[in-house]
Image (cartoon, grey):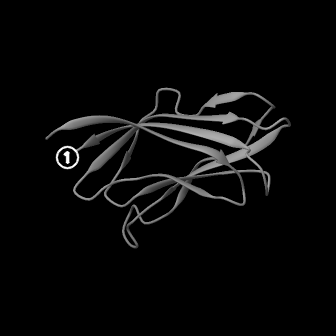
Amino acid sequence: MANTFKLKTKAGVNSATTAAVYTVPSSTTAVIIGLTITNVKGAAITADAKIVTASSSGENADDVFIVKVVPLPSGSTMEVMSGNKIILQTGDSIIATGSNGSGADADIILSVMEIT
């Protein structure tokens, strides 16, 4: 098994552009080791990050929030993971949204380790 560290980024996320930040490739397990959300808007926003599972049944079939409506003052950054790890399976995705319907709200930085 090979372990590969990867950085995934998504700029200008807002509520009008729910962004798929990362989807686990086939024949791969991924470990989220870092998730950072930065407010790039000139005003306070809220942001969400969510796991969308590829499975439609069983114990891992529910889509769940990592953070929901987390407040971010103008120019602030939040490290969401704080030392935690989350395991993702093939086809699972991380999506993110910001609170404003137009314009750039948040930049997302995701660090993962892929196990193939």
Q: What is the number of callouts on the image? A: 1
Query: Looking at the image, which residue sits at the far bottom?
Result: 56
> Quadrant location of residue 26?
bottom left
Asked whether, in this view, residue 57 is left or right of residue 4, the answer is: right
Q: Residue at x 66, y 58 (%)?
A: 17
Q: Position of residue 60 (x, y in %)?
A: 40, 61
Q: Is residue 16 visible?
A: yes
> Quadrant location of residue 102?
bottom right
Asked whether, in this view, residue 109 is left or right of residue 41, the answer is: left
Query: Looking at the image, which residue sits at the far left?
Result: 1
Query: Looking at the image, which residue sits at the far right?
Result: 43
Quadrant of the snapshot with the N terminus: top left
* Residues packed near mark 1 inside 10 Å, few (<14), some (14 to 19) or many (20 plus): few
Vertically, is 34 above or below 28?
above
Please give the residue where the numbered disc 1 appears in the rendered image. Answer: 116
Q: Give 61 or 95, whichever is nearer the viewer.
A: 95
Asked whether, in this view, residue 37 is left or right of residue 4, the answer is: right
Q: Position of residue 28 (x, y in %)?
A: 25, 51
Q: Residue at x 73, y 35 (%)?
A: 40
Vertically, is 108 above or below 20?
above
Q: Position of residue 73 (x, y in %)?
A: 80, 32
Secondary element type, mark 1: loop
Q: Amino acid at mark 1?
A: Thr
Q: Position of residue 58 (x, y in %)?
A: 36, 68
Q: Give 64 or 32, whichever is nearer the viewer.
A: 32
> Quadrant location of residue 31?
top left
Q: Is residue 68 visible?
A: no
